[in-house]
Image (cartoon, grey):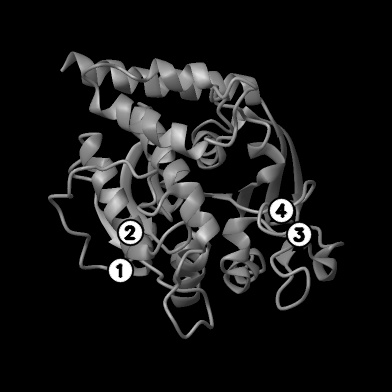
Amino acid sequence: MNLILDLDTGIDDALAISYAASQSDANLLGITTAFGNVRVETATRNSLAMLELLGLTDVPVAQGADRPWGAEEKYVPSETLLQVHGRNGIGEVVLPEPQRMPETTNAVDFLISKAREYGKDLTLVTTGPMTNLADAFKKDPEAISSIGKIVSMAGALTVPGNVTRYAEANIVNDAAAAKYVFESGFDITVVGLDVTLRTLLSGNDINAWKQPNSAIGNALAQMSDYYYANETDPDGNSVGGALHDPLAVDIALHPETITYQVPMNLTVEVGCESNGRTIGDLNRLTDETTTAIVCTNVEAAGFSRRFAAAILGLANRDQAQ
Protein backbone atom coordinates (compact mmCIF):
# COMPACT_ATOMS: atom_id res chain seq x y z
CA MET A 1 0.00 0.00 0.00
CA ASN A 2 1.35 3.42 -0.97
CA LEU A 3 1.22 5.48 2.19
CA ILE A 4 1.75 9.10 3.22
CA LEU A 5 1.72 10.07 6.90
CA ASP A 6 0.67 13.63 7.80
CA LEU A 7 2.03 14.17 11.31
CA ASP A 8 2.63 16.66 14.13
CA THR A 9 5.43 14.43 15.29
CA GLY A 10 5.25 13.88 18.99
CA ILE A 11 5.64 10.53 20.72
CA ASP A 12 2.61 8.65 19.40
CA ASP A 13 3.41 9.93 15.89
CA ALA A 14 6.93 8.50 16.31
CA LEU A 15 5.35 5.20 17.29
CA ALA A 16 3.10 5.43 14.21
CA ILE A 17 6.11 5.98 11.92
CA SER A 18 7.79 2.97 13.49
CA TYR A 19 4.72 0.80 13.10
CA ALA A 20 4.39 1.75 9.43
CA ALA A 21 8.09 0.94 8.96
CA SER A 22 7.51 -2.52 10.42
CA GLN A 23 4.70 -3.46 8.02
CA SER A 24 5.75 -5.28 4.87
CA ASP A 25 2.61 -4.15 3.03
CA ALA A 26 3.32 -0.43 3.65
CA ASN A 27 5.24 1.51 1.02
CA LEU A 28 5.95 4.78 2.81
CA LEU A 29 6.09 7.45 0.10
CA GLY A 30 6.68 10.34 2.46
CA ILE A 31 5.81 12.27 5.57
CA THR A 32 4.21 15.70 5.68
CA THR A 33 4.35 17.73 8.87
CA ALA A 34 2.25 20.31 10.69
CA PHE A 35 2.07 22.10 14.01
CA GLY A 36 0.27 20.42 16.91
CA ASN A 37 2.12 18.45 19.55
CA VAL A 38 5.09 20.72 18.76
CA ARG A 39 5.98 23.54 16.39
CA VAL A 40 6.08 22.43 12.78
CA GLU A 41 9.86 22.84 12.61
CA THR A 42 10.22 20.42 15.52
CA ALA A 43 7.76 17.99 13.94
CA THR A 44 9.86 18.05 10.76
CA ARG A 45 13.11 17.52 12.65
CA ASN A 46 11.60 14.65 14.66
CA SER A 47 10.24 12.99 11.51
CA LEU A 48 13.62 13.13 9.79
CA ALA A 49 15.38 11.85 12.92
CA MET A 50 12.94 8.96 13.31
CA LEU A 51 13.33 7.94 9.68
CA GLU A 52 17.11 7.90 10.06
CA LEU A 53 16.82 5.88 13.27
CA LEU A 54 14.71 3.36 11.36
CA GLY A 55 17.07 3.31 8.39
CA LEU A 56 14.52 4.90 6.04
CA THR A 57 16.84 7.54 4.66
CA ASP A 58 15.14 7.69 1.25
CA VAL A 59 11.68 8.67 2.57
CA PRO A 60 11.07 12.39 1.94
CA VAL A 61 9.69 14.79 4.55
CA ALA A 62 7.79 17.89 3.43
CA GLN A 63 7.10 20.64 5.94
CA GLY A 64 3.61 22.09 6.10
CA ALA A 65 1.32 24.31 8.14
CA ASP A 66 2.84 26.34 10.96
CA ARG A 67 -0.46 27.78 12.27
CA PRO A 68 -4.20 27.10 12.19
CA TRP A 69 -6.51 28.81 9.73
CA GLY A 70 -7.01 32.47 10.56
CA ALA A 71 -4.08 32.74 13.00
CA GLU A 72 -1.71 35.66 12.56
CA GLU A 73 1.12 34.16 14.58
CA LYS A 74 2.90 30.84 14.34
CA TYR A 75 1.52 28.15 16.61
CA VAL A 76 3.21 27.59 19.97
CA PRO A 77 2.34 24.38 21.87
CA SER A 78 0.82 24.68 25.32
CA GLU A 79 2.74 23.82 28.46
CA THR A 80 0.42 20.84 28.87
CA LEU A 81 1.46 19.44 25.48
CA LEU A 82 5.12 20.06 26.27
CA GLN A 83 4.68 18.05 29.44
CA VAL A 84 2.89 15.21 27.63
CA HIS A 85 5.38 14.91 24.74
CA GLY A 86 8.47 16.59 26.19
CA ARG A 87 9.91 19.89 25.14
CA ASN A 88 11.54 18.25 22.12
CA GLY A 89 8.34 16.35 21.28
CA ILE A 90 9.83 12.89 21.74
CA GLY A 91 10.01 12.54 25.50
CA GLU A 92 13.40 14.28 25.83
CA VAL A 93 15.00 11.35 24.02
CA VAL A 94 18.03 12.71 22.17
CA LEU A 95 18.28 11.41 18.62
CA PRO A 96 21.22 12.31 16.36
CA GLU A 97 20.76 15.46 14.32
CA PRO A 98 19.24 14.48 10.97
CA GLN A 99 21.68 14.36 8.09
CA ARG A 100 18.99 15.33 5.59
CA MET A 101 16.94 18.45 5.04
CA PRO A 102 13.20 18.51 4.37
CA GLU A 103 11.98 18.74 0.78
CA THR A 104 12.01 22.12 -0.90
CA THR A 105 8.41 21.33 -1.91
CA ASN A 106 5.94 22.19 0.85
CA ALA A 107 3.51 19.67 2.30
CA VAL A 108 0.49 20.87 0.32
CA ASP A 109 2.23 20.61 -3.05
CA PHE A 110 3.78 17.28 -2.04
CA LEU A 111 0.32 15.85 -1.22
CA ILE A 112 -1.13 17.15 -4.48
CA SER A 113 1.77 15.77 -6.50
CA LYS A 114 1.50 12.29 -4.96
CA ALA A 115 -2.31 12.32 -5.28
CA ARG A 116 -1.96 13.08 -8.99
CA GLU A 117 0.70 10.38 -9.39
CA TYR A 118 -0.98 7.57 -7.46
CA GLY A 119 -4.69 8.48 -7.32
CA LYS A 120 -6.81 5.66 -5.92
CA ASP A 121 -3.60 3.72 -5.15
CA LEU A 122 -2.63 6.26 -2.48
CA THR A 123 -3.56 6.11 1.21
CA LEU A 124 -3.18 9.19 3.41
CA VAL A 125 -3.13 8.95 7.21
CA THR A 126 -3.41 12.16 9.22
CA THR A 127 -2.57 12.18 12.92
CA GLY A 128 -2.43 15.91 13.61
CA PRO A 129 -4.56 18.92 12.74
CA MET A 130 -6.14 18.68 9.29
CA THR A 131 -4.62 21.93 8.04
CA ASN A 132 -2.40 20.43 5.33
CA LEU A 133 -5.26 18.29 4.02
CA ALA A 134 -7.66 21.25 4.01
CA ASP A 135 -5.14 23.48 2.24
CA ALA A 136 -4.42 20.79 -0.35
CA PHE A 137 -8.09 20.21 -1.08
CA LYS A 138 -8.72 23.93 -1.32
CA LYS A 139 -5.86 24.27 -3.83
CA ASP A 140 -6.61 21.18 -5.93
CA PRO A 141 -9.89 19.44 -5.03
CA GLU A 142 -9.69 17.14 -8.06
CA ALA A 143 -6.35 15.70 -6.98
CA ILE A 144 -7.24 15.20 -3.32
CA SER A 145 -10.63 13.70 -4.19
CA SER A 146 -8.79 11.07 -6.24
CA ILE A 147 -6.95 9.66 -3.19
CA GLY A 148 -8.07 6.10 -2.61
CA LYS A 149 -8.26 6.19 1.17
CA ILE A 150 -7.94 8.87 3.84
CA VAL A 151 -7.79 7.84 7.50
CA SER A 152 -7.65 10.46 10.26
CA MET A 153 -6.92 10.09 13.95
CA ALA A 154 -9.35 12.79 15.00
CA GLY A 155 -12.41 13.58 17.03
CA ALA A 156 -14.45 12.16 19.86
CA LEU A 157 -18.10 11.43 19.14
CA THR A 158 -19.17 8.98 21.84
CA VAL A 159 -16.68 9.92 24.57
CA PRO A 160 -15.52 13.26 26.01
CA GLY A 161 -12.65 15.09 24.35
CA ASN A 162 -9.12 15.14 25.73
CA VAL A 163 -8.62 18.92 25.54
CA THR A 164 -12.09 20.04 26.58
CA ARG A 165 -15.11 17.92 27.37
CA TYR A 166 -16.19 18.55 23.77
CA ALA A 167 -13.01 18.46 21.75
CA GLU A 168 -10.16 16.15 20.81
CA ALA A 169 -6.71 17.71 20.34
CA ASN A 170 -6.21 17.27 16.58
CA ILE A 171 -9.61 18.77 15.81
CA VAL A 172 -9.44 21.67 18.25
CA ASN A 173 -5.95 22.65 17.06
CA ASP A 174 -7.58 23.75 13.81
CA ALA A 175 -11.34 23.39 14.12
CA ALA A 176 -12.02 25.52 11.03
CA ALA A 177 -9.80 23.36 8.82
CA ALA A 178 -11.38 20.17 10.18
CA LYS A 179 -14.87 21.55 9.52
CA TYR A 180 -13.85 22.35 5.95
CA VAL A 181 -12.46 18.82 5.44
CA PHE A 182 -15.55 17.07 6.79
CA GLU A 183 -17.87 19.21 4.69
CA SER A 184 -15.80 18.91 1.49
CA GLY A 185 -17.45 15.75 0.27
CA PHE A 186 -14.58 13.26 -0.03
CA ASP A 187 -14.60 9.96 1.86
CA ILE A 188 -12.71 9.78 5.15
CA THR A 189 -12.37 7.17 7.89
CA VAL A 190 -12.36 8.74 11.35
CA VAL A 191 -10.37 7.01 14.08
CA GLY A 192 -11.20 9.00 17.18
CA LEU A 193 -10.87 8.68 20.94
CA ASP A 194 -13.95 6.44 20.72
CA VAL A 195 -11.63 3.61 19.66
CA THR A 196 -8.08 4.72 20.43
CA LEU A 197 -8.88 4.76 24.15
CA ARG A 198 -9.78 1.08 23.89
CA THR A 199 -6.22 0.14 22.90
CA LEU A 200 -3.57 -0.53 25.53
CA LEU A 201 0.18 -0.81 25.34
CA SER A 202 1.43 -2.51 28.49
CA GLY A 203 4.46 -1.75 30.60
CA ASN A 204 5.70 -5.27 29.94
CA ASP A 205 5.51 -4.60 26.20
CA ILE A 206 7.60 -1.45 26.59
CA ASN A 207 10.19 -3.21 28.76
CA ALA A 208 10.58 -5.95 26.16
CA TRP A 209 11.82 -3.39 23.62
CA LYS A 210 14.77 -2.46 25.85
CA GLN A 211 17.50 -4.43 24.11
CA PRO A 212 21.17 -3.82 25.04
CA ASN A 213 22.33 -2.95 21.53
CA SER A 214 19.13 -1.71 19.92
CA ALA A 215 19.00 2.04 19.35
CA ILE A 216 15.48 1.66 17.96
CA GLY A 217 14.12 -0.42 20.81
CA ASN A 218 15.66 1.70 23.54
CA ALA A 219 14.61 5.01 21.99
CA LEU A 220 11.00 3.92 21.51
CA ALA A 221 10.91 2.43 25.01
CA GLN A 222 12.21 5.66 26.54
CA MET A 223 9.67 7.72 24.60
CA SER A 224 6.86 5.42 25.69
CA ASP A 225 7.96 5.45 29.34
CA TYR A 226 7.83 9.24 29.19
CA TYR A 227 4.48 9.35 27.38
CA TYR A 228 2.79 6.94 29.75
CA ALA A 229 4.51 8.21 32.92
CA ASN A 230 1.18 9.06 34.54
CA GLU A 231 -0.27 5.63 33.76
CA THR A 232 1.22 3.53 36.55
CA ASP A 233 0.16 0.78 38.93
CA PRO A 234 0.15 1.26 42.75
CA ASP A 235 3.84 0.35 42.82
CA GLY A 236 4.74 3.05 40.31
CA ASN A 237 5.39 0.68 37.43
CA SER A 238 4.32 1.79 33.97
CA VAL A 239 1.14 0.14 32.68
CA GLY A 240 1.30 1.78 29.28
CA GLY A 241 -1.67 3.49 27.69
CA ALA A 242 -3.64 4.22 24.53
CA LEU A 243 -2.13 3.88 21.05
CA HIS A 244 -3.80 6.82 19.32
CA ASP A 245 -1.80 7.42 16.13
CA PRO A 246 -0.57 3.85 15.54
CA LEU A 247 -4.19 2.64 15.49
CA ALA A 248 -4.96 4.96 12.56
CA VAL A 249 -2.02 3.47 10.63
CA ASP A 250 -3.20 -0.05 11.42
CA ILE A 251 -6.76 0.68 10.27
CA ALA A 252 -5.43 2.18 7.03
CA LEU A 253 -3.49 -1.02 6.35
CA HIS A 254 -5.89 -3.50 7.93
CA PRO A 255 -9.49 -2.20 7.90
CA GLU A 256 -10.64 -5.52 9.38
CA THR A 257 -9.39 -4.15 12.72
CA ILE A 258 -12.63 -2.16 12.77
CA THR A 259 -15.42 -4.23 14.32
CA TYR A 260 -18.14 -1.56 14.24
CA GLN A 261 -18.46 1.63 12.25
CA VAL A 262 -21.11 4.27 11.60
CA PRO A 263 -21.47 5.98 8.21
CA MET A 264 -22.46 9.61 8.61
CA ASN A 265 -21.84 13.17 7.48
CA LEU A 266 -19.75 15.12 9.95
CA THR A 267 -19.10 18.72 10.81
CA VAL A 268 -17.16 20.56 13.52
CA GLU A 269 -18.53 23.26 15.78
CA VAL A 270 -16.44 26.41 15.56
CA GLY A 271 -16.25 29.63 17.58
CA CYS A 272 -18.55 28.68 20.42
CA GLU A 273 -18.37 27.08 23.86
CA SER A 274 -18.18 23.67 22.22
CA ASN A 275 -15.46 24.72 19.77
CA GLY A 276 -13.87 21.66 18.20
CA ARG A 277 -16.79 19.32 18.83
CA THR A 278 -17.04 16.72 16.07
CA ILE A 279 -20.69 15.92 15.42
CA GLY A 280 -23.19 14.84 12.80
CA ASP A 281 -24.10 17.54 10.28
CA LEU A 282 -27.84 18.29 10.65
CA ASN A 283 -27.89 19.88 7.22
CA ARG A 284 -26.88 16.55 5.67
CA LEU A 285 -28.56 14.20 8.11
CA THR A 286 -30.98 12.77 5.55
CA ASP A 287 -28.61 12.73 2.59
CA GLU A 288 -28.49 9.36 0.88
CA THR A 289 -24.71 9.71 0.51
CA THR A 290 -22.43 9.78 3.54
CA THR A 291 -18.77 10.73 3.36
CA ALA A 292 -17.38 9.72 6.76
CA ILE A 293 -16.98 6.34 8.37
CA VAL A 294 -16.71 6.76 12.13
CA CYS A 295 -15.03 3.87 13.92
CA THR A 296 -16.86 3.04 17.15
CA ASN A 297 -15.28 -0.30 18.03
CA VAL A 298 -12.10 -2.15 17.10
CA GLU A 299 -10.31 -5.40 17.80
CA ALA A 300 -8.33 -3.56 20.45
CA ALA A 301 -6.51 -6.42 22.18
CA GLY A 302 -5.45 -8.01 18.90
CA PHE A 303 -4.13 -4.73 17.54
CA SER A 304 -2.24 -3.94 20.75
CA ARG A 305 -0.51 -7.33 20.60
CA ARG A 306 0.36 -6.85 16.92
CA PHE A 307 1.74 -3.40 17.57
CA ALA A 308 3.91 -4.46 20.51
CA ALA A 309 5.22 -7.45 18.55
CA ALA A 310 5.98 -5.27 15.51
CA ILE A 311 8.10 -2.85 17.54
CA LEU A 312 9.82 -5.75 19.29
CA GLY A 313 10.64 -7.11 15.85
CA LEU A 314 12.25 -3.81 14.89
CA ALA A 315 14.26 -3.82 18.14
CA ASN A 316 15.42 -7.40 17.65
CA ARG A 317 16.46 -6.81 14.04
CA ASP A 318 18.30 -3.66 15.04
CA GLN A 319 20.15 -5.56 17.76
CA ALA A 320 21.15 -8.30 15.32
CA GLN A 321 22.78 -5.86 12.89
Mark 3–mark 2 CB contact (< 8 Å): no
Mark 4–mark 2 CB contact (< 8 Å): no
The count of marks equals 4
Quadrant containing the C terminus in the rendered view: top left
Amino acid carrying mark 3 in the image: Tyr
Disc 2 or 1, which lies upstream in sequence?
2
- Nearer to us of marks 4 and 1 is 4
Which residue has dot 1 on it? 106
Res. 56 image quadrant: top left
Q: Residues within 10 Å of mark 2 (few under 14, many from 20)?
A: many
Disc 3 or 2, which lies upstream in sequence?
2
Which residue has dot 2 on it? 42
Report how far apart the C-alphas of labels 3 and 1 lie in the structure. 32 Å
Report how far apart the C-alphas of labels 2 and 1 lie in the structure. 15 Å
- Rendered view: 211 above or below 40: above
Image position of 264 (left or right of 207): right
Q: Can residue 113 be seen in this view?
A: no
Mark 3–mark 4 CB contact (< 8 Å): yes
State the residue lying farthest toward the bottom.
Answer: 72
Report how far apart the C-alphas of labels 4 and 1 lie in the structure. 31 Å
Image position of 109 (left or right of 139): left
Which residue has dot 4 on it? 161
Q: Residue 163 location in percent, x, y? A: 66, 57
